[in-house]
Image (cartoon, grey):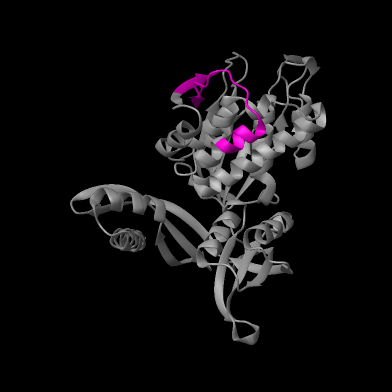
Amino acid sequence: MRLLILDPFHGAAGDMITGALIDCGADKTLVIQAMDAVVAEPAVTRVTRAGIRAVKVDTRAMPAHRTFAEVMERLNEAASRVPAPALAMARRVFERIRKAEVEVHGEQPHFHEVGADDAIADIVGACTALELLDIDGVIVRPIALGHGTATGSHGTFPIPAPATAIILKDAGLTVASGRDEGELCTPTGAALLAEFSSQTGAEPAVYTILATGYGAGTRDPHNAPNVLRAMLVEAAGTSGRLDGDTVNILETNVDDVSGEVIAHAIARCMEAGARDASAIPIVMKKGRPGFLVRVISLPETTGQLAELMALELGTLGIRCLPAVHRFIADRAVRDIEVEIAGERRMMPVKYGMMNGKVYTVKAEFGPACNWAAELGLPVREVLRAVGDAGWKALSDEREKL
């Protein structure tokens, strides 16, 4: 199982998280493209913080505050340039911040953290970077909050900020004051860590470190590196058997909606966090043709997805098959050199493993689709070439053993 371990030992902010994930291997060009779609093209540089080299992300955002509805509209407008799962994740992060700010301040025309342009860019960038790493879960170690007081639009307040405290409380994340003075964990950083850790259990006892990355904050104190560390790890299996988890299955039969509406509903469910969604042709009562629409959901998103299915499909009932166990194969993504039409490129390939052996090799569709467009070739040809290269690389490694 491929996991991401985040170490906010000197605090967490959106730019630090994004920088750490880029340094850990997320495609910098695609992250910049996603951030540029919502605010402006950020500057990504390498800096040093108390002797630690790290990636610094500067959103270059001008001061601005927007309503929650305006933020959601900005995300909708960026849908063509931001991966759908990352966009859905970003929406959930903003919901966490909005809920906390409403609990602290009540309903207001503009939200401070939610509406800030730099927060919008940081959240979209971090969610895109996480999606690009293609991991199975995130472990968040104890978060340093800092101590003392800070000043904001509502005057001086104790650290952590009220919204930050609520976000961390709702997520059940472990925190510590830390040694440093000042606000170390921002509401944006807290909401990102809360969302990232929402689908993961305990940290594995044994794992292999595949990559490390450091994201830099703005300050550079001489006595401690102002960085957040990310580690990409492969958890070691003890039995060699498939791991598993528990999901809910939502189902409904429809016979009065078009294929276009069903396709749109499936896309909306995937954006909202469904693990999978499908439509199966069936014959209903009185011989009417229809579809069985099925959505696989994590337990915590079942209610939201059921409501979404009802709204999009107009159905009056959603069946829920609760606590269905599923087996999950171990997987790892590696960059493999591929040559097509005389051009060489490093392409991501996903390996599926069972009992310690690779049983499936599959090219990642997005990068393959982009390369196919550049080459003017059918995407199926590029997918086949990348997959063949993945199998060959595996065979070459075995011969060397």
Residue appearing at x 61%, y 32% in the figure: 70
Q: Which residue in the rendered view is the most extreme toward the bottom?
A: 286
Give the residues in magenta. Answer: 46-73
Of 300 and 316, which appears nearest the observer? 316
Residue appearing at x 44%, y 24% in the figure: 45
Q: Position of residue 329 (x, y in %)?
A: 55, 64
Q: Which residue in the rendered view is the most extreme toward the left?
A: 342
Q: Position of residue 342 (x, y in %)?
A: 18, 51
Whether residue 12 is visible, yes or no, is no
Q: Position of residue 71 (x, y in %)?
A: 60, 33
Where's the N terminus, which quadrant? bottom right
Whether residue 270 is visible, yes or no, is yes
Where's the C terminus, which quadrant? bottom left
Of 101 and 67, which appears nearest the observer? 67
Which quadrant of the structure image shows residue 275? bottom right
- Let me know if residue 25 is in the magenta part: no
Which quadrant of the structure image shows residue 388? bottom left
Of 126 and 26, which appears nearest the observer? 126
> Can you say whether 178 is above or below 319 in the image?
above
The number of numbered badges drawn on the structure is 0
Q: Position of residue 284 (x, y in %)?
A: 63, 82
> Can you say whether 9 is above or below 93 in the image?
above
